[in-house]
Image: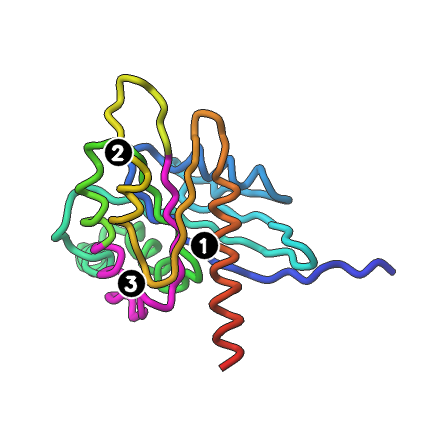
Amino acid sequence: MISRPPHVHLDVLYYKTTMSAPETLLRHLCSLGRDGAVADEPVPSEGRVLWARGDVVYSLHLFFVWLRGTWPAPTLADFAALEAAENRGSTTFAQRFAALKRAQAIVFLTDNQAYRFKRNRQFLLRLRADLISAGRDPDTVPVVFQINCYCREDVLKTPTSDIIQVLTWPRCDHVEVFPQEMRGAKEALDRAITLYEEMSAEHEAR
């Protein structure tokens, strides 16, 4: 009998500060592994895919949280509480808050458009506040900053080196991604898994 690699469940949260809907990236990621499936929703925000890494196959649960507005702003916990108090049958923010509670790695989505540069720090503060409101220690959650790079000449851009100086986290990395060429998203997700593996190994060694 052929032995199959074990499946390891991993929750990866995509914290999205860009304006476009997450469906394109979500479907792209789910197409890169095996048995990818995207939730049947009007605007899909989650998907599952088997992701092979050496002898281990991860069963990934990908969940997208996308933001509007600037800091200071209510946390996801505040939005979830307001949603429950209104009692209109909606669970959108409750689902996002639950995903934040269980996230084992985070991919922070941004891009190199110059007008977003000042907002990056604000959204990073929101991520930290959201994690704290979810009862998490932000320093224990690894973050990969996925920097979507746009090459159009009519777009004023911020150098990646400047973005890296602003977007920092206790355990993090930065990956340039080129959406128009469908290049780099896999590397960003792989890097998030690697950071999770490194932190888990360090925790077990203590």
Question: Residue at (60%, 50%) from the top-left corner?
Answer: 51
From mark 2 to mark 1, how far is it between C-alphas? 27 Å
What type is the residue that disc 2 sits on? Thr
Instruction: Specify which label sits upstream in the sequence, 3 or 2.
Output: 3
State the residue position of label 3: 131
Q: Residues within 10 Å of mark 3 (few under 14, many from 20)?
A: many
From mark 3 to mark 1, how far is it between C-alphas? 14 Å
Report the front residue among 44 and 194. 194
State the residue position of label 2: 158
As helix, strand or loop, the secondary structure at mark 2 comes to loop
Instruction: Specify which label sits upstream in the sequence, 2 or 1.
Output: 1
For the record, the magenta segment spans 125-148
Colour logic: rainbow
Q: Residues within 10 Å of mark 2 (few under 14, many from 20)?
A: some
Q: Residue furthest left?
A: 72
Give the quarter of the figure containing the N terminus: bottom right
